[in-house]
Image (cartoon, helix red, strand yellow):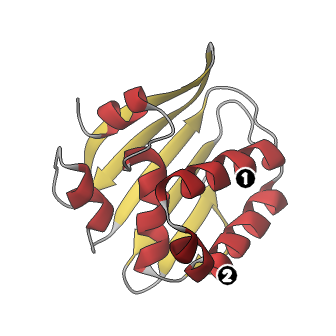
């Protein structure tokens, strides 16, 4: 995989995390990156401590902002699996690296500091939904999106 770009997630005045996007083929087109069927990685390096509830809440808000009610309902089992995994991780500490790896044959695997957490979450549609949080029409942070697109 090749580094496509790195973006900084800010919330108010706080720097929350850096997100590096690794893809098979670099692109500046968000739709291409969201719909890519091959292996990918979104690698978050935490710049501050974030408790599990806040992390899950921000993730859920990002999905709600970029998916229809029908899409959300269709992904409920995967979203529930993600929520359970992140709650089991607990607080993400400053310096932690959280990877969201997608492999076509295995789904989405979450690792924290290189240690797998939870079970792989099946479905390309789930990973595409996660990508929309950062690269969708209503990204969580415009600057983060621009950076991940290589800008």
Residue 138 visible to an observer of this rendering: yes
Residue 31, above or below 50: below
Q: Residue at x 78, y 68 (%)?
A: 84
Residue closest to the eye, 54 or 26: 54
Nearest the eye: 98 or 133: 133
Question: Which residue is outermost to the front?
Answer: 69
Residue at the spot x=53%, y=83% of the render? 122
Q: Which residue in the protein does label 1 denote?
A: 56
Per the rendering, the mark at residue 144 is none
| Residues at marks 1 and 2 touching, judged by CB atoms closer than 8 Å | no
Quarter of the image that includes the C terminus: top left
Quadrant assignment, res 75: bottom right
Q: Residues within 10 Å of mark 2 (few under 14, many from 20)?
A: some
On the question of residue 1 being in view, the answer is no
Q: Secondary structure at mark 1?
A: helix
Whole-percent x, y for residue 139 in the image = 44, 42
Q: Where 50 falls versus 87 (above or below)?
A: above
Q: Position of residue 110 (x, y in %)?
A: 59, 63
Residue 77 circle label: 2
Disc 2 element: helix
Residue 7 location, quadrant: top left
Residue found at the far top of this picture: 13
| Distance of label 1 from label 2 (alpha carbons) | 15 Å
Q: Residue shown at 46%/39% (left/top)? A: 19
Residue drawn at x 47%, y 64% is: 129
Sequence order check, earlier mark of 1 and 2? 1
How crowded pointer 1 is (Cα within 10 Å; few <14, some 14-19, many 20+) is rated as some
Of the pair 97 and 9, the residue shown nearer to us: 9
Pick the quarter of the image with the N terminus.
bottom left
User: How many numbered discs sit on the rendered protein?
Assistant: 2
Q: Position of residue 127 (x, y in %)?
A: 45, 68
């Amino acid at each position: 995989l090749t580094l496509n770009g790195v973006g900084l997630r800010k919330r108010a005045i706080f720097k929350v995390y850096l997100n590096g996007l690794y893809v098979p083929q670099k692109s500046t087109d968000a739709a291409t990156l969201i719909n890519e069927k091959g292996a990918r990685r979104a690698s978050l390096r935490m710049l501050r401590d974030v408790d599990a509830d806040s992390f899950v809440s921000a993730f859920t808000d990002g999905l709600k902002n970029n998916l229809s009610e029908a899409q959300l309902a269709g992904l409920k089992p995967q979203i529930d699996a993600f929520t359970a995994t992140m709650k089991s991780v607990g607080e993400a500490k400053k310096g932690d690296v959280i990877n969201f790896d997608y492999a076509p044959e295995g789904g989405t695997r979450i690792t924290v500091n290189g240690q797998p957490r939870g079970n792989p979450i099946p479905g390309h549609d789930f990973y595409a939904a996660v990508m929309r949080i950062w690269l969708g029409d209503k990204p969580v942070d415009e600057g983060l999106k621009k950076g991940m697109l290589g800008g």
